[in-house]
Image (cartoon, rainbow, N blue to C red):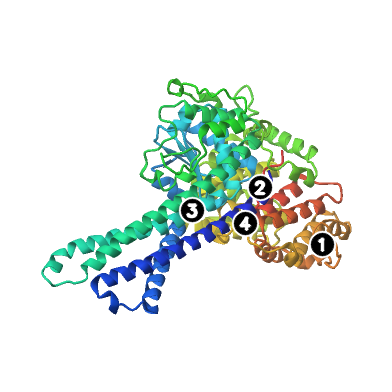
């Protein structure tokens, strides 16, 4: 599955949506023009009614403004982050440090899938619903959340829950969340006309007494307009539901296929669907928001003429062709999460000594050495992307377990997560820079931050680059709980700590980009990808490839590696290697800003070219792989860990 291609296909679906929306609004404009004419004619002699340009203009402009403003408002509200959907569905956010085995299992499965796929770890919301269901909501991976019903958590085993989460993560990676938001906004705008009609009808009813006393002669027109708008809005909503259902069904088939490809375990998602079929509550939800957000769910959450999901038997047959059309008696099933296995990420980690004393340095050093010895080429690493099987998920669990337990605990709550990220950026070579960093933290952060940061730092000394990036990703849900003021101080301090030694290396820059991607919504535009081509951005590509060439050749001539990477983008040979002073971090920031306007597939081509540049000297290091991941994050195309 080429997720970069799927991102661009999702943009194509969005364009198709707006075409249908425009056609629907055009039909509505014509209908309202006719309705306005009839309403005015009801109060005046039809012969005296002039079918004037003014009437057409007023009705058309009013309709366009009402529908588009309502849609834009709804889309803007939904685009503020997936939490607004989760909260409107009655979801309660799960605490990252919870010790409840059931909640811990859900969090662990989501965490493993996020880290394996390279996306930020999303907050998880639990809905007190009996139906087996889940959803992913948000505008982008940066503000996505996962919602899970209690029925899903208690009626599915770990493999089945993993299959459901893989389905939801495919929606995140395929760009379906943005499609879902736009679908919801468009239908809301069309149905909003019914609300206007209801208001006009109520006004006409209230003014009925005055009309009978001869004091008001416009009530009849209001009644006709009100009833007409109710009908037009209802019909518009009817056809909107048809559009939503047809698009949603196809994206659900894609998500099912992606989930099987992710986990390499068709029994997981097929088993989840079978348990829904054998459950008295099915996947139905009682929440008031279920109707509006029905197309976001794992399985149909409501009964509807235009189902947003394919029938269960068809979905199961596509995954398991040998299925015998029988469902388990799910009502009698109750899955209890294992206390020991699901608490491992909180209470301990692999590598603890028999006496219970943590061998932090030994475990971390061993992990780092193994990763350096087995680091593949950057191009091999890219080829492994998108293949999230059980072996890879087991490796992710092992990677998380290899990190000292105290660090994992710090990453789970807001204060500790900030101290952890500050500690990652403390300078261990330049004592003057370290002193400046300490003063920055002391003067700008909350009381006790410097003490906790310096307490954490020794535990980070022997961690590999991969483990450090995992800690960044682990911290994301906790950082999301910060207030706007706390987040602003945090972001400012991150930038200042990186620049304290007045000499930012490429890995620090990439680490900053990963932090920005995970947390820095204010620094990125809402549109993840644009439509620009690589040909129009070759000079910017040259800055990125030039930086990699100058950085990774250990004093050797950077020209051959630059040429090797650039040939993948431009065979004309006209683009020359920029001098090192033109490939600095400020130049890279400017280049990344322009490169983010490329399409997802074009960005993938650039990432491939970066891998070719890194591999040219035949000595790809773990740090270079992490730099590649940082560049990919800066391009809104995150990559999973190097396993």
Mark seen at residue 3 = 2
The answer to whether residue 111 is visible is no
Label 2 or label 4, whichever lies nearer to me, is 2
Residue 288, percent from left and from top = 36, 44
Residue 441 occupies quadrant: bottom right
Residue 613, percent from left and from top = 81, 54
**In what quadrant of the picture does the N terminus appear?**
top right
**Depth check, front residue: 202 or 388:** 202
Residue ID for mark 1:
570
Mark seen at residue 183 = 3
Residue ID for mark 4:
435
Mark closest to the chain's N terminus, 2 or 3 = 2
The answer to whether residue 282 is visible is yes
Q: Are marks 2 and 4 in contact (CB under 8 Å)?
A: no
Image check: 49 left or right of 515? left
Q: Are marks 4 and 3 in contact (CB under 8 Å)?
A: no
Residue 523, percent from left and from top = 57, 61
- Distance (Cα) linking label 1 and label 4: 46 Å
């Amino acid at each position: 599955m080429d997720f970069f291609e799927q991102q661009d296909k999702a943009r194509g679906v969005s364009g198709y949506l707006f075409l249908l929306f425009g056609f629907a609004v055009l039909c509505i404009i014509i209908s309202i023009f006719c309705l306005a004419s009839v309403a005015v004619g009801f109060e005046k002699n039809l012969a005296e009614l002039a079918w004037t340009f003014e009437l057409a203009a007023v009705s058309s402009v009013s309709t366009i403004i009402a529908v588009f403003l309502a849609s834009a408002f709804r889309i803007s509200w939904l685009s503020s982050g997936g939490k607004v959907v989760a909260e409107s569905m009655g979801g309660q956010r799960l605490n990252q440090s919870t010790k409840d085995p059931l909640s811990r299992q859900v969090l662990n499965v989501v965490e493993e899938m996020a880290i394996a796929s390279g996306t930020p770890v999303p907050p998880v919301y639990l809905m007190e619903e009996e139906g087996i269901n889940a959803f992913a909501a948000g505008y982008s991976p940066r503000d996505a959340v996962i919602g899970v019903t209690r029925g899903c958590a208690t009626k599915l085993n770990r493999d089945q829950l993993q299959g459901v989460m893989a389905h939801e993560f495919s929606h995140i990676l395929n760009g379906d969340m943005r499609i879902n938001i736009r679908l919801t906004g468009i239908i809301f705008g069309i149905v909003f006309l019914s609300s206007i009609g209801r208001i006009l009808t109520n006004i006409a009813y209230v003014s009925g007494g005055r009309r009978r006393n001869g004091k008001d002669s416009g009530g009849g027109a209001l009644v006709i307009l009100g009833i007409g708008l109710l009908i037009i809005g209802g019909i518009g909503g009817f056809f909107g539901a048809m559009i939503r259902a047809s698009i949603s069904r196809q994206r659900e088939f894609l998500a099912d296929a992606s989930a099987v490809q992710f986990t390499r375990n068709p029994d997981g998602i097929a088993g989840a669907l079978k348990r829904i079929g054998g459950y008295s509550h099915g996947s139905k939800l009682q929440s008031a928001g279920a109707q509006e957000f029905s197309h976001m769910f794992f399985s149909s959450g409501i009964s509807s003429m235009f189902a947003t999901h394919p029938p269960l038997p068809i979905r199961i047959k596509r995954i398991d062709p040998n299925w015998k059309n029988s469902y388990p008696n799910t009502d009698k099933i109750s899955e209890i999460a294992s206390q020991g296995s699901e608490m491992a990420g909180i209470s301990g980690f692999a590598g603890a000594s028999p006496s219970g004393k943590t061998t932090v340095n030994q475990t971390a050093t061993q992990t780092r050495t193994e990763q350096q010895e087995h680091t593949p080429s950057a191009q091999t690493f890219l080829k492994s992307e998108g293949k999230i099987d059980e072996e890879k998920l087991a490796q992710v669990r092992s990677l998380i377990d290899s990190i000292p337990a105290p660090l994992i605990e710090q990453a789970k709550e807001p204060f500790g997560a900030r101290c952890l990220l500050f500690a990652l950026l403390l300078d261990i070579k330049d004592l003057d820079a370290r002193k400046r960093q300490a003063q920055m933290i002391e003067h700008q952060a909350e009381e006790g931050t410097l003490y906790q940061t310096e307490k954490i730092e020794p535990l980070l000394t022997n961690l590999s680059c991969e483990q450090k990036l995992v800690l960044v990703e682990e911290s994301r849900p906790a950082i999301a709980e910060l207030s706007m003021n706390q987040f602003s101080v945090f972001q400012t301090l991150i930038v200042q700590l990186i620049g304290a030694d007045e000499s930012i290396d490429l890995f620090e820059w990439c680490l900053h980009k990963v932090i920005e991607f995970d947390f820095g919504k204010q620094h990125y535009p809402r549109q993840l990808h644009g439509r620009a081509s690589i040909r129009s951005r070759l000079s910017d590509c040259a800055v990125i490839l030039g930086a990699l060439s100058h950085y990774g050749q250990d004093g050797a001539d950077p020209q051959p590696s630059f040429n090797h990477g650039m040939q993948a983008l431009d065979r004309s040979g006209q683009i020359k290697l920029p001098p090192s002073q033109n490939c600095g971090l400020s130049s890279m920031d400017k280049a990344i800003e322009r490169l983010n306007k490329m399409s997802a597939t074009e960005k993938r081509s650039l990432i491939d070219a970066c891998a070719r540049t890194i591999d040219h000297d035949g000595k790809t290091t773990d740090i270079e792989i992490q730099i590649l991941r940082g560049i990919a994050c800066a391009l809104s195309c995150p990559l999973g860990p190097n396993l």
